[in-house]
Amino acid sequence: MSVVKLNIVNKRMLNNPAEPSNDAHQPLLELKAVCKSYGETSILNNINLSIKEGEFVAIVGFSGSGKTTLISTIAGLIQADSGEVLKQGLPITAPGPDRGVVFQNYSLMPWLTVFENVALAVDQIFKDWPAEQRRAHTEKYVRMVNLGAAMDKKPAELSGGMRQRVNVARALAASPDILLLDEPLSALDALTRGNLQDEILQIWAQEKKTVILITNDVDEAIYMADRVIPLNPGPDATFGPDFHINIERPRDRTALNHNPEFKRLRAEITRYLMDIGIEKNLGSAQDKIVLPGVKPNTGNDWDRDLPAFAAPAPGRLAAYTPSLAIKPAQDDLGRPRYLEFSRLSKIYPTPDGNSTVKVVDGFDLKMKKGEFISIIGHSGCGKSTVLSMTAGLNSVSEGVIILDNKEIDSAGPDRGVVFQAPSLFPWLTAFENVMLGVDKVYPHASKSERDGIVEYYLTRVGLGDSLRKKADDMSNGMRQRVGIARAFALSPKLLLLDEPFGMLDSLTRWELQEVLMEVWERTHVTAIVVTHDVDEAILLADRVVMMTNGPHAKIGKIEDIDLPRPRSRKALLEHPDYYKYRESILSFLTECDHTH
């Protein structure tokens, strides 16, 4: 296995070219002091990399860190401003069939079949072959990605996972020396993603390709690669240290959960990434923002024992600490059956209208006040259906949902909802988007008090400097922060989160999980999160509720998460019970997978 030259090592070797190399053979791919800027912004700075033939290298980093610029430079789609990009010692100056690229988006011709999309590349690159040879070659790679039965289907008839398989087949059919994978699986659900990871590894082993995988998923990187290299966030992105994955192949996901080397690498890479990009000073500036002492009109019970001076004078912000201001009544926390699901079911008509299907069948659960629950299960198990019925956005077919002794039969401001896409008004600022809800819930408060509430929560989620920025000018991660701030600002009895970070890269997701936990620790609002992410489920929840596959989905198992709070991802990775909980949930999901 070759070694990625760290920046410091590469500088030494560049300054001393006579110094002998440790590599026995010339590397297949080399990047030497590569720099790339767009206008005044430096994206890549002094990138040095050396990869041997047949290696599988994963590069992990944040959104916007320059990963796609890096892969496009290697592909020859863009040119470096300075430095060298070499393949077998020769400069890369243009795209070529020796480098197959698979991007995150599918880029298929919608009017062509699966076979025809792959044949496009084969017919262009192997023009001199007889038609029958080209056809056999195309079929070989379509079947290699398990699309033999879908050969005559068009992209519109395929799932996201199947469309990405076509992309992989097309890249491989060109018989490249290097396969460049730019986050090809990030838009897929966890089950499909895992299946495609295994297929790519199988092809890599068969075809003896050199693979560079760009990913934001640490588990994916460790599972697939020989080496994992962090790309430090830009501008001026540079490589961090390389992590060698000394875990025997073939690797088994369930066995990895018991592997001490996997646990060590996972903790080290996660810690490194969090240290360089996530940990921010959330304390001093935010704690200067205080929350006005006004109650919402949603009937929530707040601390009854606030000192007399806590009530603000009209038109002035409260002068007490945020922790006093937003803690619910401690004597009421833990009240049993605060939220109760009793024999909850949802029935939909079939597409032909001749019959019905029961998607959720007899969901029974009791929650305490202030409890945080995660609901997890495979796609189609009805977890989002349960959440939408709880929000009052979807009617209940059978059974009942009781919140604080009242039956839920419609939507209401006593339930704050955060969806996967936060549904902001793009022409309004972050401040204005949150104020829409605050105006409704605090009609009795003064303008300065309402302004103070909005500013408090936007500052808490790290948007204190972006209050007046329009939603349309924000990244996905920033928009989701606004959605979280908006939900908390309503001071709801119940917080409902439906895959709130599902559209975000895993590193942004970590950051927002920390934000969510920090704000939740101050409110202890009763909360439910729907997720497909096992680590997220454990990190956030007091209990993880696992649902069986649909139709007729119900609760299959409940895992109590007895881990100390407040929690951080770093601390959890080092807790002796963490992997026990992880294995319990993964085993359940694996059993469900086998019943598909």
Image (cartoon, helix red, strand yellow):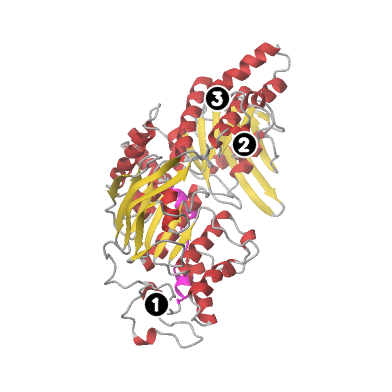
Q: CA distance from mark 1 to mark 2?
A: 51 Å
Could you say whether the residue bearing mark 3 is in a helix, strand or loop?
A: loop
At 31% from the left and 59% from the top, the residue drawn is 565
Query: Depth-wise, is mark 3 or mark 1 nearer the camera?
Result: 3
Q: Quadrant of residue 71?
A: top right
Is any atom of residue 18 visible in this view?
Answer: no
> Which range is magenta?
270-291
Please, what is the three-letter code of the amino acid marked with disc 3?
Answer: Leu
Image check: 239 left or right of 313? right
Is any atom of residue 564 visible in this view?
Answer: yes
Please, what is the three-letter code of the amino acid marked with disc 2?
Answer: Tyr
Q: CA distance from mark 2 to mark 3?
A: 15 Å
Residue of label 1: 321
Residue of label 2: 106
Q: CA distance from mark 3 to mark 1?
A: 60 Å
Residue of label 3: 147
- Front-most of 494 and 250? 494
